[in-house]
């Protein structure tokens, strides 16, 4: 761990409750801390030093010095979870964690803090309090304990979007600590078998069967078939009731377990297993608590499964509306990419197309229909096919775009669309560019320099037809030259727009990324999409790259003609 890095061993960011404003815990011995990521400093008051088991005269103020108190297995878990928390951009958190002080005593501590971010959204500081924690499992059956734990899990489930999110949330240290549990197991019913998707991270091997059948003598299978929870209070009950499972359980430090059905729409979709280190009586209040928690997990899991189904439908619809195959074009190399930044049923209206023509030229189109829903995707598919048809019929670029705009208006939809169309002659290198409210084309020259081709543009498709009325729709044509070995990029605004940043700055950044990227178009397309995706701008992204072959001959020695006609 570098001195200035986010948690490699210290508490902040480890196990998050998911609340935007963390609720305070009743303190025992408590101190304050202020961790400056950039400076690598962790300022602790005298009480915090005592809680951590550090002597003031031995502490040099570096975060790394405090991190060394954390046992290696705990530090590894902290690093992985801290990265996730910081990516989520959550403001407040509460966390249990362990340290071993200079006196050799292993302590369980609790931190409550706020994460501070700079204007660019980067975490810079964590400030808060750290206290000695009581035994995490104490009092879980009491009313206050039940309320706190139910709220913790409800908060975690509210943040889950996918089944993997549910799996990660279940082994959150806050939940395990409140339950006094070793770990949680999550199994889902699939095709008459139990599929384990979450296992506790205990540093030991938990015996499990690979997708066991539901008719096998196993506690999770029994819960699915009976729809009733199963409480095993001691190893003796494991040995007596599940003899085939016992040989694997015996060497494992497991004292008791609760297996709870996850029920949605009157059917058991899975099982939640809660593992305890010591024999456990499971009094009525605790059984009720565990059943209540299982209900919350079932709702989170049901929502995640529904989300996954909706996301698959949306993705399939989007892909069905895009070209299934990009044609081979003599004299050029072509690469396309599409990435949805939306979740669930949201689907974008971005599209691209490559249209070879009978005379050996090629049409390149890219566009974006307003909105992020199935209607936008359907309109996108219609526009893409109509524009392709007009281009294939041989209509000049301006005419093809004008007719497409009129078609969109006749659809009687409130949607509009932006689009850029480039007609490329790969023998001469001549480009004819028309734009309907969309981004310009970007060209990378042979010497590696890049330029946006400033081209005249008209209104977006649909709007231009509405404002033109019965008159002609005007789309100016800009001419440019693409030399041998040079590449043209068309993209949608998801590749350059980022909330809170200047569009001109982002366009220069994209130009720099193209200039610095690989020459081969497939590698360049992947390079650009990865860089854009890391910025998480929240919009769909589509791009189309065409590189004219190095062997092309014709007008490459002519000066480029950028006159608008």
Image (cartoon, rainbow, N blue to C red):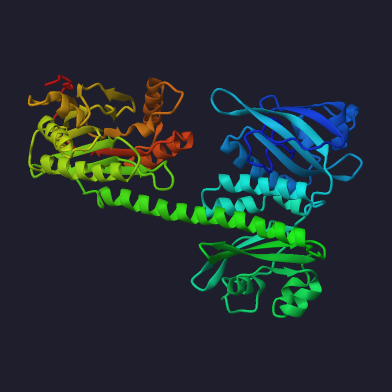
In front: 234, or 559?
234
Point 57% across, 75% down: residue: 214
Residue 538 in the image: x percent, y percent? 43, 36
Dividing the picture into quarters, in which one does residue 229 lie?
bottom right
The N terminus is located in which quarter? top right
Residue 233 in the image: x percent, y percent? 79, 69
* Left or right of 311, for residue 251: right
The C terminus is located in which quarter? top left
Q: Is residue 474 visible?
A: no
- Where is 119 relative to 109, above or below? above
In front: 28, or 321?
28
Dividing the picture into quarters, in which one does residue 481 lie?
top left
- Where is 515 relative to 196, above or below? above
* Left or right of 440, for residue 42: right
Dividing the picture into quarters, in which one does residue 423 lie?
top left
Q: Is residue 329 visible?
A: yes
Residue 444 in the image: x percent, y percent? 30, 29
- Where is 85 relative to 232, above or below? above
- Where is 236 relative to 140, above or below? below
Point 63% across, 41% down: residue: 18
């Amino acid at each position: 761990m570098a001195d200035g890095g986010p948690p490699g061993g210290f508490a902040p960011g480890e196990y998050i409750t998911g609340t935007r404003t963390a609720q305070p815990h009743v303190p025992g011995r408590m101190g304050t801390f202020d961790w400056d990521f950039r400076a690598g400093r962790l300022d602790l008051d005298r009480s915090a030093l005592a809680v951590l088991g550090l002597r003031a005269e031995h502490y040099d103020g570096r975060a790394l010095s405090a991190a060394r108190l954390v046992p290696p297995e705990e530090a590894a878990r902290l690093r992985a979870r801290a990265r996730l928390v910081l990516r989520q951009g959550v403001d407040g958190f509460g966390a249990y964690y362990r340290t071993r002080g200079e006196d050799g005593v292993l302590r369980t501590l609790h931190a409550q803090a706020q994460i501070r971010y700079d204007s660019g959204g980067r975490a810079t500081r964590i400030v808060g309090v750290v206290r000695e924690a009581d035994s995490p499992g104490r009092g879980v059956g009491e009313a206050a304990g039940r309320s706190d734990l139910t709220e913790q899990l409800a908060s975690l489930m509210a943040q889950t979007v996918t089944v993997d999110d549910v799996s990660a949330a279940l082994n959150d240290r806050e939940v395990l600590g409140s339950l006094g549990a070793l770990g949680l197991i999550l199994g889902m019913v699939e095709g008459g078998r139990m599929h384990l998707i979450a296992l506790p991270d205990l540093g030991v091997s938990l015996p499990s069967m690979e997708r066991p059948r539901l008719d096998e003598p196993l506690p999770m299978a029994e819960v699915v078939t009976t729809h009733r929870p199963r409480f095993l209070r001691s190893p003796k009950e494991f040995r007596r009731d599940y003899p085939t499972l016992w040989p694997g359980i015996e060497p494992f430090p497991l004292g008791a377990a609760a297996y709870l059905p996850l029920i949605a729409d009157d059917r058991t979709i899975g099982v939640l297993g809660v593992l305890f280190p010591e024999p456990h009586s499971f009094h009525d209040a605790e059984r009720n608590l565990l059943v209540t928690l299982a209900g919350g997990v079932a709702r989170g899991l049901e929502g995640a499964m529904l989300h996954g189904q909706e996301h698959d439908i949306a993705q399939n619809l989007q892909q069905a509306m895009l070209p299934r195959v990009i044609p081979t074009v003599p004299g050029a190399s072509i690469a396309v990419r599409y990435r949805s930044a939306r979740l669930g049923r949201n689907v974008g209206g971005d599209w691209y197309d490559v249209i070879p023509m009978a005379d050996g030229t090629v049409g390149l189109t890219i566009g974006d229909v307003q909105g992020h829903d199935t209607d936008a995707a359907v309109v996108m598919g219609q526009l893409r096919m109509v524009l392709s048809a007009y281009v294939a019929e041989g209509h000049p670029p301006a005419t093809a775009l004008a007719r497409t705009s009129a078609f969109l208006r006749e659809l009687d939809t409130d949607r509009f669309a932006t689009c850029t169309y480039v007609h490329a002659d790969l023998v001469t290198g001549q480009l004819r560019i028309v734009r309907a409210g969309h981004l310009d084309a970007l060209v990378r020259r042979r010497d590696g320099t890049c330029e946006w081709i400033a081209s005249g543009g008209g209104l977006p498709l649909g709007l231009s037809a509405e404002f033109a009325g019965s008159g002609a729709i005007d789309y100016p044509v800009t001419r440019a030259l693409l030399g041998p070995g040079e590449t043209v990029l068309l993209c949608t605004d998801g590749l350059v727009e980022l909330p809170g940043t200047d569009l001109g700055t982002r366009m220069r950044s994209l130009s720099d990324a193209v200039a610095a990227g690989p020459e081969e178009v497939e590698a360049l397309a992947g390079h650009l999409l990865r860089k854009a995706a890391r910025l998480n701008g929240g919009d769909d992204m589509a791009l189309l790259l065409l590189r004219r072959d190095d062997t092309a001959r014709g007008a490459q020695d002519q000066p480029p003609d950028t006159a608008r006609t």
